[in-house]
Image (cartoon, rainbow, N blue to C red):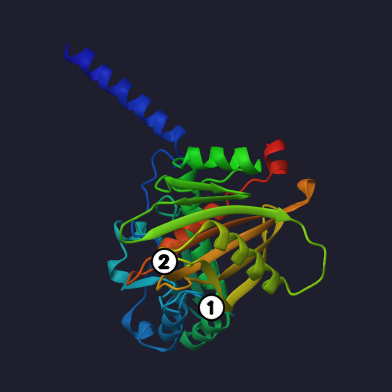
Amino acid sequence: MKRILLASCIIACIIMACDSRRRSDKPFLIPSSSGNPYEVMVVVDDSIWNGPAGKALRKALNAPVPMLPQDEPMFHVTRITPSHYDRITNMFRNIVVFNLSDDYRDAKFKYEKDVHSYQQAILSINAPDTQAAADYITNNAGTLQRFFTKEEIDRQIKKIQYNFNTKFNDSVKKYFNCEIMVPPDIMKMKVGKDFIWGSNDGLETIQNICVYSYPLDSTEGDEKQKFINIRNEFMAKNIPGYNPGSVMETTEDIVKISYLKINGRNVMEARGLWDMSKDAMGGPFVSHTFVDSENNRAVVVEAFVYAPSKMKRSMIRRLEASLYTVKLPSDIKNK
């Protein structure tokens, strides 16, 4: 009887493990990384940490996140000495390690992934001495910041791939013939003309994703101003404020436009701040504008947050990951 029970338990464990692997790409025997999103652990001794290299690294990691209403650091930084870097601490999700040696002629970054745990990113700073490391960090701070930010975005994308709001995705398919994966807590939904708005409708923080489209315009003009005008028009029609006559507006002097390449497709990214006219509401937004050539239209997917007196970095970054999951009709057709 005991052997039968033992065999049953083993079979059940195998089935559960196989089911878990179907819902995740995590290797079977590798532990998951520890730590929270946007936390970075630095492994370095006191002399380097308190010198120019440590100062340069802290400045890079603690730089403010762009386009937030209040200053928030890009990362939460913790530090341990090499003597405490062991089988437990080496499983942290984001790690920076210093390697200073005469063996290195020049300073450089070395990138490694999943060394000690799953979804782990390790950046090693290899340099001949402290000053060389400090200079290299200062001159390549953006590269360091983008490396860890991209890792966090990719982790969130993997997370929502296995748990996203299928109803919102179905509505985007129905009205736009597009696809997008949004977090499962984005439950409340409103549909307008060429517009869908999803929200978690939270009590203390409101996290939102919206999709809208409009015909392509070949006329020349300032791309930033055209974006602002179109955004204001859609938001005014579809997202009213609580007070009479209150509508969502874009803070025009705080908008940054940049251009990305996502899955081989050119995308216009916009970051900035929004506010409600005749009201005290406001917060950050980020959007991606896609060109759907087959249908002669632009498709915009935007994330925005309202979180008074709360830190907003992780909220907006969490939603931003969904923008990278967008599929246009041509992408769906070629799947």
Q: Establish if 185 lies above or below 98.
A: above
Which class describes the residues within 10 Å of circle 1: few (<14), some (14-19), or many (20+)?
some
User: Answer yes or no: do the residues labelled 1 and 2 have beta carbons within 8 Å?
Assistant: no
Residue at mark 1: 141
130 or 188, nearer to the observer = 188
Q: Is residue 18 visible?
A: yes
181 or 239, nearer to the observer = 239
Q: Quadrant of the N terminus?
A: top left
Query: Taking 171 as reference, is 47 left or right?
Result: left
> Please, which residue is most extreme toward the front here?
244
Q: Is residue 291 visible?
A: no
* Callout in the foreground (1, 2): 2
- Label annotation for residue 243: 2
Q: Earlier in the sequence, mark 1 or mark 2?
A: 1
Query: Residue shown at 46%/32% (left/top)?
Result: 22
The location of residue 201, given as percent across then percent down, is 38, 53
